[in-house]
Image: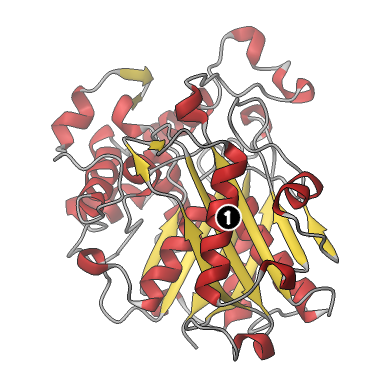
């Protein structure tokens, strides 16, 4: 079943941060409500009209919204006809967009709200994510730091197999920082060089501190509606043209191939075929960058270059402002924010780019955007292709 043009994004909302923390000591419930209100107000839709609610939380992290839709619905005062608490890590929200579109197309709801929030930075209780016992038993007793250890293993294998270097990974961190410098809301905006990345503390060889995402608060919300309802909204509708999702494993020991994101590859194939567009048609790309290696592997898996070519593909600041491949245009999880799970912010930035609302970081005449969420340890993926028409 195709869900092309089944739903439009008509409202987005997020919260302002100060040095990575929410302003005013608000709770994780409050910032989700604030984001939801902004998204609904922007669309010109009342809370009473929301009949579909989509939420996800992250296990094992204090301050992260771990609430199923029933709990969030109670707090928001929403009694939906349709709800979804799908949790596949950072790709949950891209999946929610597809699920919401399918529900709208099927007549199960007409106005869907996707919402997420975290106050993990304010709580200052960041702990390693505890893997589920079923899979963690093969990793945790041996001291593998989670999640960075698994990503480091993938990075080292890619280096061994394809000759990828730490300098290649640093190119991604530097490029995303340049985008962040154009974003007044980004957490990190100081100049950054490749040498800065390479000289930063080694966290899990070969990943340095500046190869790793930030730890911040944050919240976001997205409103999707039916095509008929979109006609009455205040904003320019941004259409879901294609969406796919998949997962191949959860813990790193179950990953079929450390250098190939099969979930992202499978999800992208479905999304591109549904949208009826090619890679050359895409104007802006937003991918999950929990680590620099995440972004590099994702670019390959999505088909923008062949396996093993990611290092050369991102070289010479190709993904930076003014380069030929606009990537993570708000600064990404590496420099903008990373509130436990980042996938909802990828969608919000893509919508802003397609609306032409990004000021100094605006990609000229962006008509099509690809968004890819990643969850677990390179485990899950959902790809959304969004367009103005």
- Place of residue 323 in the rendered image (x, y in percent of width and height, measured from the top left): 20, 63
Let me know if residue 81 appears in the view.
yes
Please name the residue shown 26% across and 55% down the image.
183
Q: What scheme was used to colour the molecule?
A: secondary structure
- Place of residue 161 in the rendered image (x, y in percent of width and height, measured from the top left): 42, 37
- Place of residue 37 in the rendered image (x, y in percent of width and height, measured from the top left): 56, 61
Please name the residue shown 47% across and 49% down the image.
288
Q: Residues within 10 Å of mark 1 (few under 14, many from 20)?
A: many
Please tell me in which quadrant of the rendered image residue 286 appears: bottom left
Q: Nearer the viewer, residue 171 or 369?
A: 369
* Quadrant of the snapshot with the N terminus: bottom right
Q: Is residue 279 left or right of residue 230?
A: left
Q: Is residue 40 left or right of residue 171?
A: right
Please name the residue shown 24% across and 68% down the image.
359
Q: Secondary structure at mark 1?
A: helix
- In this rendering, the count of numbered labels is 1
- Place of residue 66 in the rendered image (x, y in percent of width and height, measured from the top left): 69, 36
Q: Nearer the viewer, residue 226 or 4?
A: 226
Where 110 sits versus 128, above or below?
Answer: below
Where 77 sits versus 200, above or below?
Answer: below
Let me know if residue 91 appears in the view.
no
Q: Is residue 304 left or right of residue 130?
A: left
Where 202 sits versus 287, above or below?
Answer: above
Q: Nearer the viewer, residue 263 or 359?
A: 359
Q: Which residue is mark 1?
A: 264
């Amino acid at each position: 079943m195709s869900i092309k043009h089944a739903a439009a994004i008509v409202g987005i909302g997020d919260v302002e941060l100060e040095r990575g923390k929410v302003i005013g000591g608000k709770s994780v419930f409050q910032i989700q409500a604030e984001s939801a209100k902004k998204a609904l107000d922007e669309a010109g839709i009342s809370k009473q009209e929301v009949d579909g609610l989509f939420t996800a939380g992250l296990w094992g992290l204090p301050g992260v919204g771990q609430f199923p839709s029933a709990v969030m619905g109670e707090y928001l005062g929403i009694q939906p006809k349709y709800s979804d608490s799908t949790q596949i890590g950072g790709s949950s929200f891209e999946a929610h967009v597809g699920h919401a579109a399918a529900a709208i197309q099927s007549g199960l709801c007409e106005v869907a709200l996707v919402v997420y929030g975290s106050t993990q930075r304010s709580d200052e209780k960041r702990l390693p994510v505890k893997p589920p016992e079923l899979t963690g038993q093969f990793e945790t007793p041996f001291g593998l730091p989670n999640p960075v250890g698994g990503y480091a293993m993938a990075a080292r294998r890619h280096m061994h197999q394809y000759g990828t270097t730490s300098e290649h990974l640093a190119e991604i961190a530097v490029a995303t920082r340049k985008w962040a410098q154009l974003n007044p809301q980004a957490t990190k905006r100081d100049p950054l060089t490749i040498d800065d990345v390479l000289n930063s503390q080694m966290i899990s060889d070969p990943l340095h501190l500046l190869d790793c995402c930030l730890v911040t608060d944050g919240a976001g919300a997205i409103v999707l509606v039916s095509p008929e309802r979109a006609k009455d909204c205040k904003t320019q509708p941004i259409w879901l043209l294609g969406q796919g999702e998949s997962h191949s494993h959860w813990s790193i020991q179950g990953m079929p191939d450390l250098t190939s994101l099969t979930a992202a590859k499978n999800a992208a194939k479905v999304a591109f075929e549904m949208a009826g567009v090619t890679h050359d048609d895409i104007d802006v790309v937003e991918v999950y960058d929990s680590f620099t290696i995440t972004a590099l592997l994702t670019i390959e898996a999505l088909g923008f270059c062949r396996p093993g070519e990611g290092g050369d593909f991102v070289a010479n600041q190709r993904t930076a402002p003014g380069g030929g491949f606009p990537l993570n245009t708000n600064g990404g999880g590496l420099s903008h924010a990373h509130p436990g799970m980042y996938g909802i912010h990828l969608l919000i930035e893509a919508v802003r780019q397609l609306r032409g609302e990004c000021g100094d970081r605006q990609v000229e005449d962006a008509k099509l955007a690809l968004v890819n969420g990643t969850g677990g340890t390179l485990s899950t993926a959902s790809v959304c292709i969004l367009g103005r028409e």
